[in-house]
Amino acid sequence: MRSLALPSASGFDEMIGPEQAVRPHYQGYHDWLLHQDRQQLQRKQKEAELQFHRVGITFNVYGEDSGTERLIPFDTLPRVIPGDEWRLLEKGAIQRVKALNLFLHDIYHDHTIIRDGRIPADQIFGNAQYQPCMQDVTLPNQVYSQISGVDLIRDGEGTWYVLEDNLRTPSGVSYMIENRRMMMRLFPELFASQTVAPVEHYPSLLLGTLQQSSPVSAPTVVLLTPGQVNSAYFEHAFLAQQMGIELVEGADLFVKNGFVYMRTTAGPQKVDVIYRRIDDDYLDPLAFRPDSMLGVPGLLSVYREGNVILANALGTGVGDDKSIYPYVPDMIRYYLDEEPILANVPTWQCRRPNELNHVLANLPDLVVKEVHGAGGYGMLVGPAACKSQIEHFRQRLKANPDNYIAQPTLSLSTCPIFVNEGIAPRHIDLRPFVLTGHDTRLVPGGLTRVAMTEGSLVVNSSQGGGTKDTWVLEESLC
Amino acid sequence: MLSRTAADLYWLSRYFERAENTVRMLDVAWNLSLIRFAVNPLDEITAPLMISGSWEQYQQRYGNISVQNVMYFFTLDEDNPGSIFHCLRQARTCAHAVRGKITSEMWESVNSTWLELKEIRQLGLSQYGETAFFDWVKNRSHLFRGATYGTIMRSDTFRFLRLGTFIERADNTARILDVKHQIGNPDTGTAVDFYRWHAVLRSVGAYEAYREMYSEAINADRVAELLILRPEIPRSLMSCMRVLCELLPAIKGDAGLTSKRLAAVQMARLQYGSTQHIIELGLHEYLTDFLRRINELADTIRLEYLEVA
C-alpha cells in the first residue's frame, strides 16, 4: 500500500508533517498501513458498508420511500489525536461549556454580564432564541446544556479553533460509537498494538448525566423523538436502546395534575427527565407553535414548576447563536476568571462600524454569515464568489449590518482517506460531545466529519460528507 | 412498556402472521383452481375473497373474477390493505418504530424481507413464480418467528409480539374453516368435498396430522374437531386460545382485566366444548360466534393495553 497522494504543502495534514515526515502519533498506524494489501483494504471498506446497511445505520432522506435510507460514507482510515493534545482540547471544551452554562443561568436570572457591560442587552433579549419564559426558572445544579457539541477545526498552521458551539440537540454521537465498533471488527490487530482510548461507555455516561439532572432519586428518563421520519431517528433509537430507556413520541406523553406521564401497558407512569431531540418551538403546542404535533400540551407549565427536567433546557439556543459566539472567550474570563484554552475563529461583528469597514474592505477574502442563519444559507464565501455576488452582498451588509458577522477563510486541516486510486487527503473537523451533570466530562474523541470530495470544505452529511473513527492515543508511540 | 411500543410489536407480528396465512390460503386456492372439476373452477379462486371478507372491495376494483386478478389483488396490490405487500410493508414500518426494542436479527429479517419483496414486485408475480412466492413468504415468516423465538428476551416485548401472532392466527383459522359455508357448497359427500377439506387441512398445515390422528376418511366433523378443539395442532383455535390465556396474565401490571376475562371465558368454551356440541350448533354458527368473540378480545386488548387514553 504505497500509492499515497501527498497533502498540499500549504495546508496542515494530520498524518504527514513537514518534509513528508509521518507525524509521530501516526507512526504505528502508518507502519501497519505500509504492509497492507490494497485489495484487502478495499474488501474491508466494502464489508463496512455492507454491515452498516445490514444493521441499518442510516439516515432518512426526507420525502423518500421508507425503504430508501442512505448511508453516511464511512472511511476506514482513522483520525488520530495524541493523548497530550487531547487533554488540552478536553480542558478547553470543559472550560467553554462551563462558561456557557453559567452564562445561560445568568441571562435567565440576574443579567450581571449585561449590567457589567460585557454583552449589549439587545444581543440577548432581542435574540430569537431567547426564551422569556425561562426567566427565574431554577434548574437543578444550574445546568442548562447537559449535552453540548463543540465543533473544532484546525487551520493551515495546525492551530485548533472552536468553529461553533451546539447547545440545542447536537447529533452524531451514535456514529462515533458505531464507527469505533466497526473499526474494532475490521482491524482488531490495530487495537491490540495501539492504546486507543475507549468511547463505548458514552451511553452510560449520558444516562448518568441525565439522572443527575433530576432532584428525584432513581428518576425515570425517556428520550423524546419527533418520530421515524426524522433524519436522526436511527440515533434516537440507538441511544434509547443503549441506555435502556423508553423512546417516546409526543403522543406517548401527557400532563396531568402538574406532572408528565407516559402511557404504558401497565397504566400511566411518571416521567422525571426528558432527553428531548425536538426543538424548543415544537415542545408544547400550548406555549409555542400551536400546530406542533410533536410536542406535549402543558409540558412547559410542568417544566416551570420543576416537576420534569428537560435536557437540554429550554432557551439554550441563545448560547450557541452566531451573534453570541464572539463573546464566548470574554464569558470565560468573566465567569471563570480564566484565560480561554481554545480560541475562537477571529470574528468581526458588522454591527460595530469600524469592524464593518474592515469587512467591506476585505470582502473577497472573508466568509460572511448571517447571525441567525444555519446550514450554509445566507452566506458569502469571498474567495469562491464572483464580483457581482460580492457587490450584492456588500449592499446587503450596508443595509443591515447587525445581521452579519465575518470570519477569515480558514482552510481546514486534512487527513488521508481511502480513495479508488489509493490514499488522498481530505478536509476534516471534529465534534466532541461534552456532558454536564454534577461535573462536566467527555469521552476521549468525538465525531470526525470528512469532506469526501477533493478540495471541498463541506463536511455536512446532508451534502455528502462522511465520517471516520477518531482515536485518542493514550500514549505516544514514538 | 410504552403503549405505542406494545402496539407496534403487536401489529408487527400480526401483520407477519396475516401475510403467512394469506399465502397459505392462496396456495391452496391456486392449486385447486388448477384441478378441473365439473363445477365452476372459479369458485375456488373466489374462496380467498370470501374468507378475508374482501369480495366487495375486489369487485369494485376489478369487476370480473380471474385467477390472475385475484392473485395480484392478494399478493402485490399495494392498494389492498389485505395484500401480502401491504402486510409486509406495515410489518416493516412497525419494526422500524421499535427497532430499539427488538433484536438486530429480528430487525434484519423484517428489513431484508421488505427489500426482497420490493424486488419481487418489480419482477412480477408470474415471472417470479406463484408457488415460489408462496414458499418465499412462508420461509420469511418462519425466519422471523425463529429469529424472534431464538433471540428476544422473555419480557413484555416477547408477550406483545406473541399476542399479535395468536390473535391473528385464531381469527384466520376460524375464517379458513368457514370457507365451505362462504362459497355456498353444502356437503355432498363427493370427490369435490374431499378436495375442499383436504385443501383446508393443507392450508393450515394440518393434513399430515389428520392422517396421523384419524384413520377415517377426511370429513367435515373430524376436520372441525381437529382445527377447533385439538391442542396438538399449532394453528387450532384451542392452541391459539391456550397461548393467549398464558400471555395475558403474564403481562406486567394490573391492566387488562376485561381482556383476561374474555380470553378465559373463550378458553373454557373450548376446553369444555365437544365436537357434538359444535355439530348441533352448526359449524358456521359456531365459527361466527367465535369470530365475534376473538374480535371483541382484540378490541379490548387495544383499549386496555395499546391505545390507553
Image: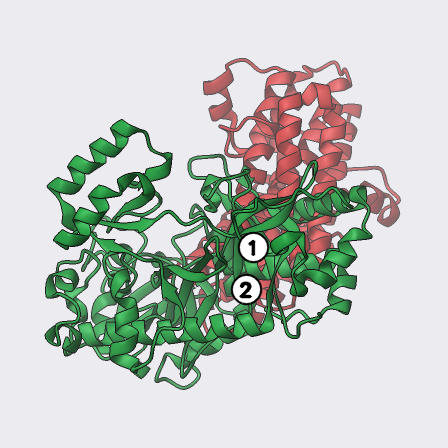
Chain colours: A green, B red
Query: Would you place residue A454 above or below residue B13 in this image?
Result: above
User: Which residue shows up at 22% across the image and 56% down it?
Assistant: A285
Judging by the rendered image, the residue that carries numbered circle 2 is A241
**Nearest the eye: B306 or A97:** A97
Residue A222 disc label: none
**Nearest the eye: B187 or A151:** A151
How far separated are the C-alphas under marks 1 and 2? 9 Å
**Nearest the eye: A365 or A112:** A365
Residue B99 disc label: 1
- x and y, in percent, of residue B92 in the image: 56, 44
Compared across the picture, whether A336 is left or right of A233 comes to left
**Disc 1 is attached to a residue of which chain?**
B
User: Which residue shows up at 52% across the image and 26% down it?
Assistant: B55
* Circle 1/circle 2 CB separation < 8 Å: yes
Q: Is residue B25 visible?
A: yes
Q: Is residue A381 visible?
A: no
Hey, what amino acid is under mark 2? Gln
Hey, what amino acid is under mark 1? Arg
- x and y, in percent, of residue A260 in the image: 31, 70
Question: For numbered disc 2, what is the local secondary structure?
Answer: helix
Residue extending furthest toward the front: A19
